[in-house]
Amino acid sequence: MSKRPPYPFAALEAKWMRIWDGAPLEATAELGQVGSTSLRIAWVECLTKRTLRCGFPGALEGGDRWIPHPAEFGRDACRVALLSRPGELTGDRPSSEELTAAARFLGRVWRLYVDEADTVEFQQACTLDPTQSVVALEGIGLSLALGPDLPSLSMHRVWHSCLQRVEQGIAQQRPHIAVAALIEFVNQATLWPKRPRALLTDFLLVLQPFAPILAQELTAKCRLHATGRAPYEPVPARSGDWPTLDSKCLTETALEISIQINGKLRDTLMVSGDVSPAALEKAALSAEKVVPFLQGKVIRRVVVVPQKLVNIAVE
């Protein structure tokens, strides 16, 4: 492994462990939670077998005794390395090779979200004064590739395939399947020239049970970009926040339908290939992002172009 870490995990740990230490217990109890009740039960059992925590501090029951070189790899990498192993954990510490692979994966996650130039400036600032690394973190912004763009059909398929495999891995208490799905998603998303911020924010909810510290930092940066305020408190992925799997996206017959109002794109829908025009019109009129544009308006005409779009003419 190179001397320069794949992402600034040491500064992230210093920042978030301090925040979590000062947070109320109830604010950290759900860190790393997953979706349904059955998934949560399976996840807790899975972590218990591996001496890992679900809640605060979201890392390890055994502390640094599990990490051969904590200054080189970090807690999240250790957690991912342990969860990447097939079968049941026997108590052995992860090897340097396992930790290296986990840290490199988390480095790819970091680069998927953050601005490369800001990262270079962070590294330079830390070289000049390593004691200011936590402060320098705040100068790292999001990548310009992240934006409000709507996900394409292929992006939806990649994401929901990942989510399905993560849930299957958790339900079967085979976390290595879930980790493999996360790695595959990141490899695919890295190739996207434009990365839908909403979709990648959902990904962080699913990443948090596996790499809570990194997920916390990236979630904070996404919220800072959206609201102008960074949450300097734990941002737990509570069970109610867990993304909903859309099985229609996993079939080759799924269609991505554009919904226009007076010719302007307002939303997209994922529907099955055999959806009727009447059902498509009804779904378009009730779409979450469309409804606000229809309030107080008179609908004059609805044009349904099968397997392509719905245009709603209003005045």
Image (cartoon, rainbow, N blue to C red):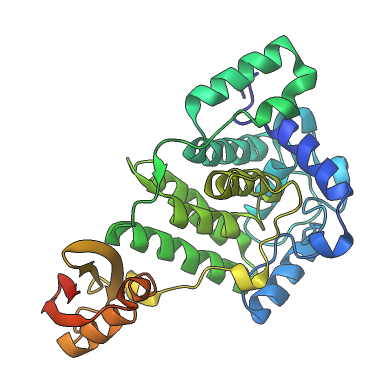
How far across and how far down the image is residue 44, in percent? 75, 69
Residue closest to the eye, 259 or 75:
259
Q: Quadrant of the C terminus?
A: bottom left
How far across and how far down the image is residue 19, in percent? 82, 45
Q: Quadrant of the N terminus?
A: top right
Residue at x-position 71% and y-position 62%: 88
Residue at x-position 25% and y-position 73%: 254
Q: Report if residue 69 is visible in the image.
A: no
Quarter of the image for residue 284 reads bottom left
Q: Report if residue 237 is visible in the image.
A: yes
Residue at x-position 58% and y-position 18%: 121
How far across and how far down the image is residue 131, in percent? 80, 20
How far across and how far down the image is residue 155, in percent? 34, 57
Above/below status of 292 relative to 60 = below
Answer with left or right where residue 3 lies relative to residue 282: right
Residue closest to the eye, 111 or 114:
114
